[in-house]
Image (cartoon, helix red, strand yellow):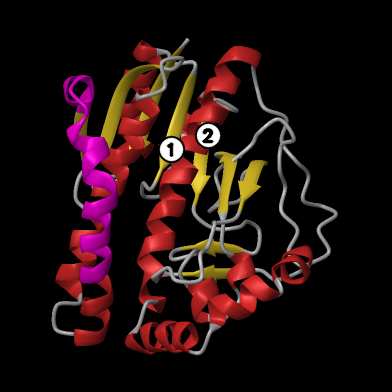
Amino acid sequence: MSTVVFTSNSLRHKAFAAIINNNPNIDLLKVFHEDGSPLNELIKKREKNIIELGHLEARSIAEKDFFELYINSQNKIQAISEIVPRSWFSSKACLEILKELNPSQILVYGTSIIKGEIINYFKKKILNLHLGLSPFYRGAGTNYFPFVNNEPEYAGSTFMYLDQGIDTGEIIHQFRPLININDSFHQFSNRFLISSFKTYSKIAERNLKFGLCEPFSTNNIKNKKRLVYKKSDFTSESVIKLYKNLKNGMLDKYLLNKEEKCNNVPILQQDWLEV
C-alpha cells in the first residue's frame, strides 16, 4: 500500500511532499520533483516589471517563512526524492518506472499538465490537488484571480481524480480558505496551502484504508461561472486591482456577508472530512 508523489520544485512543493511524508499511515515510496522552480522562473521573467516583481518577491519571502520549517525537518524525504525533466510525467519512461513501482496511489500537485497512457493505466489511482474551485475557476492563478475579481467566495481547493482535461477530473472534496481580517494576501494564501496539504494527506490516508473515495457529480451545480486563466493573464493591471480591492475592504465585506456569498457558490464536501 505505497504512495508516489508528483510535484514541482519550489518551496511550497517540497513542503507538500514533507507533509505527506509526515503522515505515519502513508508509506511514501518516491517523490518526483519536476525540474525548475515555477516561482523563481516567474520572478526572472518579471524582473523588469516593478509592480509584478514586488508581488512575487513578497510571495517568495512569505513562502520561506511558512514552508522552510517543514522542509528542514525532513531527512528521509531527501533519499527518496528525484528531479525529473519538465513534462516527464507524460512520458513512456515515467510510465515504465511507475509500472515497476506499482504504487497504490499517485498524489499530484503543481506539475505541468499530465497527459497520455499513464492516466488510463492508473485510472482512479491518480489524485490531484487543484488550487481553485472547479468548475468555476480553472487553469493558472485560480486562487489569485478571485481576489482580483473581488469575489473571495470563489477561492478554495479542489481534490479530484486526474483525467485528460485541465482541472476537469471527478471531484472528491473542496474547501475554502480561513481568512482573517488583518491577513495580508500572502499570509492567508500560504496558511491555506498548508491546510490543503494536510487535508490532502487525510484524503490519501483514507483512500489507502477504504479504497476509492466516492466522487461528486457536478451536473446539478446551478452556478454557471466558468473561467479559465493562463499564466499570461498575470499582469501589472491585475496586481494593482488586487491590492486596490484589499485596500478598499474586500476581505471585511466578504466576511460580513460570507454565508450569503458562499451559498451562491456551492462546494462539494465529504461529511467524514473535517478541515
Front in this rendered view, residue 59 or 158: 59
Residue type of the residue flagged with mark 2: Leu
Q: Is residue 210 above or below residue 4?
A: above
Q: Is residue 115 visible?
A: no
Front in this rendered view, residue 91 or 156: 156
Name the residue: 35% across, 12% down: 100
Q: Is residue 103 above or below residue 123?
A: above
Among the two numbered marks 2 and 1 on one chain, the one whose residue lies closer to the N terminus: 1
Q: Is residue 71 above or below residue 260?
A: above
Q: Which residue is mark 2?
A: 127
Give the SS element for disc 1.
strand
Give the SS element for disc 2.
strand
Residue type of the residue flagged with mark 1: Val
Is residue 64 a member of the stretch shown in magenta?
Answer: yes
Is residue 259 a member of the stretch shown in magenta?
Answer: no
Name the residue: 14% across, 77% down: 47
Q: Are marks 2 and 1 in contact (CB under 8 Å)?
A: yes
Spatial distance from mark 2 to mark 1, Cα to Cα? 6 Å
Q: Position of residue 83 (x, y in %)?
A: 19, 35
Q: Which residue is mark 1?
A: 108
Q: Position of residue 249 (x, y in %)?
A: 53, 84
Task: Considering the whole magenta stretch, tell me its main secondary structure.
Answer: helix
Q: Can you name the residue that lies furthest to the front here?
A: 182
Mark 2 neighbour class, 10 Å CA radius: few under 14, some 14 to 19, many 20 or more = many
Question: Quick check: 111 left or right of 45?
Answer: right
Mark 1 neighbour class, 10 Å CA radius: few under 14, some 14 to 19, many 20 or more = many
Quadrant (top left, top right, bottom left, bottom right) of the C terminus:
top right
Q: Which residues are magenta?
A: 57-81
Within the image, what quadrant is residue 160 found in?
Answer: top right
Q: Position of residue 272 (x, y in %)?
A: 71, 30
Name the residue: 44% across, 40% down: 197
